[in-house]
Image: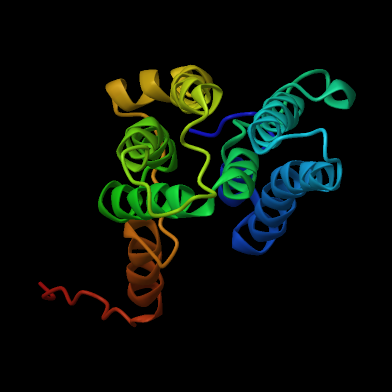
């Protein structure tokens, strides 16, 4: 089953990998650049490090909402996963890399992009809470209460935006995606092989 949103996953289902990759890259860097631009405020002595983190969170909220509800597309956009991944990388990359590892693990086993996105998103606040106990990185934003709250909002948002996918997962109608071949391609190859193999005409005994 195909959704009607303009996200990377739907592009992959409809037009294939070559069309989906540029969409993912654009969505990713849209979120990343929006967050990184807030670093320009470091040159203002009146802006503290805590406020830089808060500005990054605000930028993330607006860029993700703009992706999910685009004004110029009748407020019908994508799920915001790629944009959120880019924005989260701009806030603090190590945690996003861990979430991406979770995403790859879940996707490699079950081949559901929606399931992988939700599991990785739900792990995000857990990783933030774990990293908040570590003090080896003085620049990490974990002393910011808004950042911790934000991580939980991200997890909830990903579940909410995938509520239709949850319904399809429960009924078994959610489509799987195989990046390196899958059952459909194997069936296609087998059918092509069968079609190419000459069949002998059955012989009948003459009376």
Q: Residue at x 27, y 77 (%)?
A: 201
Residue 180 in the image: state x and y as whole percent. 41, 67
Residue 111 in the image: state x and y as whole percent. 34, 49
Q: Is residue 51 above or below residue 120?
A: above
Residue 97 in the image: state x and y as whole percent. 45, 55
Q: Residue at x 77, y 47 (%)?
A: 39
Residue lying farthest to the right in this orientation = 72
Q: In this view, does 184 lie above or below 82?
A: below
Query: Quadrant of residue 196 in the image?
Result: bottom left
Residue lying farthest to the front in this orientation = 45
Q: Is residue 19 above or below residue 122?
A: below
Query: Quadrant of residue 124 in the image?
Result: top left
82, 137: nearer the viewer: 137
> Along the horizontal axis of the image, is 138 left or right of 37?
left
> Along the horizontal axis of the image, is 10 left or right of 132?
right
Quarter of the rendering occupied by the C terminus: bottom left
96, 80: nearer the viewer: 96
Q: Residue at x 34, y 62 (%)?
A: 187
Q: Is residue 159 above or below residue 139?
A: above
The number of numbered badges drawn on the structure is 0
Residue 176 in the image: state x and y as whole percent. 39, 45
Tell me if residue 177 can be seen: no
Q: Which residue is drawn at 18% across and 77% down?
A: 203
Tell me if residue 168 can be seen: yes
Colouring scheme, one of rainbow, by chain, secondary structure, one colour: rainbow
């Amino acid at each position: 089953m195909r959704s009607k949103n303009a996200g990377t996953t739907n592009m992959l289902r409809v037009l294939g990998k070559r069309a989906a990759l540029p969409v993912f890259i654009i969505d990713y860097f849209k979120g990343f650049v929006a967050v990184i631009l807030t670093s320009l405020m470091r040159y203002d002595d009146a802006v503290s490090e805590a406020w830089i983190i808060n500005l990054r969170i605000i930028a993330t909220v607006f860029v993700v909402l703009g992706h999910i509800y685009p004004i110029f597309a009748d407020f019908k956009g994508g799920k915001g996963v790629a944009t959120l991944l880019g924005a989260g990388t701009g806030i603090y990359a190590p945690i996003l890399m861990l979430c991406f590892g979770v995403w790859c693990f879940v996707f490699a086993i079950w081949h559901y992009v929606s399931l992988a996105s939700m599991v990785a998103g739900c792990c995000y606040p857990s990783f933030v809470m774990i990293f908040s106990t570590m003090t080896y990185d003085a620049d990490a934003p974990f002393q910011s209460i808004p950042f911790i709250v934000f991580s939980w909002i991200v997890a909830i948002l990903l579940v909410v935006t995938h509520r239709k996918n949850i319904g399809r997962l429960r009924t078994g109608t959610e489509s799987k995606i195989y990046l390196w071949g899958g059952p459909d391609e194997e069936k296609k190859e087998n059918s092509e092989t069968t079609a190419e193999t000459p069949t002998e005409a059955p012989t009948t005994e003459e009376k």
